Image: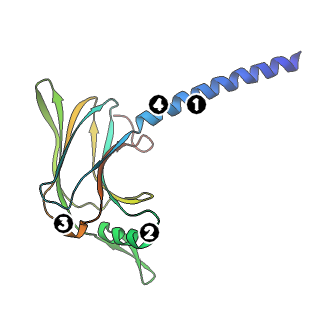
Amino acid sequence: MTNMRCKDYIGKNTMKVLIITLVFSWLTACDTSRSDISFEVQKKGSKVEIEYRVILPKYYFFRLDFLHNKGDRQDRDRVKRLVGGFIKENGEWVQKPGVPFSLRLKIDKLEGAGSKQVFDENIFDSTKISIQENSFGKIIAVVPLKPGVYRFTIESLKDVPELNGTPVLFNFYINTKTFPTL
C-alpha cells in the first residue's frame, strides 16, 4: 500500500513538472520571436517599413542576414568574404572588413494619430558578426523598446554592386538569455 501511494505521488508531481515545463517552453518560444524580411541592401533607395507590436520591454536586436546556399562551400566562402570577419589566410586568422554598406534605421513609436521618434541612425557597416546555418549576420543595432506599437524603417543609402545575387534578410528579435528585461 505504501508503494502504491509513493508511485501515485511521483506520477502526480511528474505531471505537474511536465505541465510547468510545457507552459514555460511555450512562453519562452513566444518571447524569442523574430521576423525575417527580404531587403535589397545592395540597391540605393531600397526601403522596408514594418509595424510591430512590442509586448515585452526588452532589448531588440536588429540584424542583416546575408544568405548562402546551404551545403555549397564555395558560395559560403564567397558570402563570408563579402560580410567580413575573421578569415583564415595562410594558416593565420585575419580580420577582414568585408564590403561596406550604408543604411538608415529609423524606429518610431506610434501614439494615437502621431508618432514619437525612438531611434534614427545612419549605419555604416558593422563589425558585430553572427553565424547561422545558412547565413552570416551583421548586428546593426540593439535598441531598448517598451510595450507599444512601433514602425521600423530601414533604407539603403548607397549602391553596393558586390552584393548583387546575395539574398539579404532584415530581421529583429529579442534574446532573453543574454539581455535582461528593461
* Distance between the alpha carbons at the discs numbered 1 and 3: 47 Å
Q: Which mark is residue 138?
A: none
- Looking at the image, tell me whether mark 2 or mark 4 is earlier in sequence order: 4
Q: Residue furthest top?
A: 1
Mark 3 packing: few (<14 Cα in 10 Å), some, or many (20+)? some
In the image, residue 19 lies at what x, y percent?
60, 25
Residue underneath mark 4: 27
User: The residue under label 3 is which amino acid type?
Assistant: Val
- Taking the image as shown, residue 159 lies to the left or right of residue 139, namely left
Which of the two marks, 1 or 3, is nearer to us in this view?
3
Residue underneath mark 1: 21
Q: Residue furthest right?
A: 1
In the image, residue 97 lies at what x, y percent?
28, 70
* Distance between the alpha carbons at the discs numbered 3 and 4: 40 Å
Q: Quadrant of residue 45?
A: bottom left
Mark 4 packing: few (<14 Cα in 10 Å), some, or many (20+)? few
Q: Residue at x 39, y 73 (%)?
A: 87
User: The residue under label 1 is which amino acid type?
Assistant: Thr
* Distance between the alpha carbons at the discs numbered 3 and 2: 23 Å
- The secondary structure type at the circle numbered 2 is loop
- Taking the image as shown, residue 88 lies to the left or right of residue 41, namely right
Mark 2 packing: few (<14 Cα in 10 Å), some, or many (20+)? few
- Looking at the image, tell me whether mark 3 or mark 4 is earlier in sequence order: 4
Q: Which mark is residue 72?
A: 2
User: The residue under label 4 is which amino acid type?
Assistant: Leu
* Distance between the alpha carbons at the discs numbered 1 and 2: 38 Å
Residue underneath mark 3: 160
Between 126 and 114, the residue placed more toward the observer is: 114
- Looking at the image, tell me whether mark 4 or mark 1 is earlier in sequence order: 1
Against 35, residue 18 (above or below) is above
- Looking at the image, tell me whether mark 1 or mark 2 is earlier in sequence order: 1
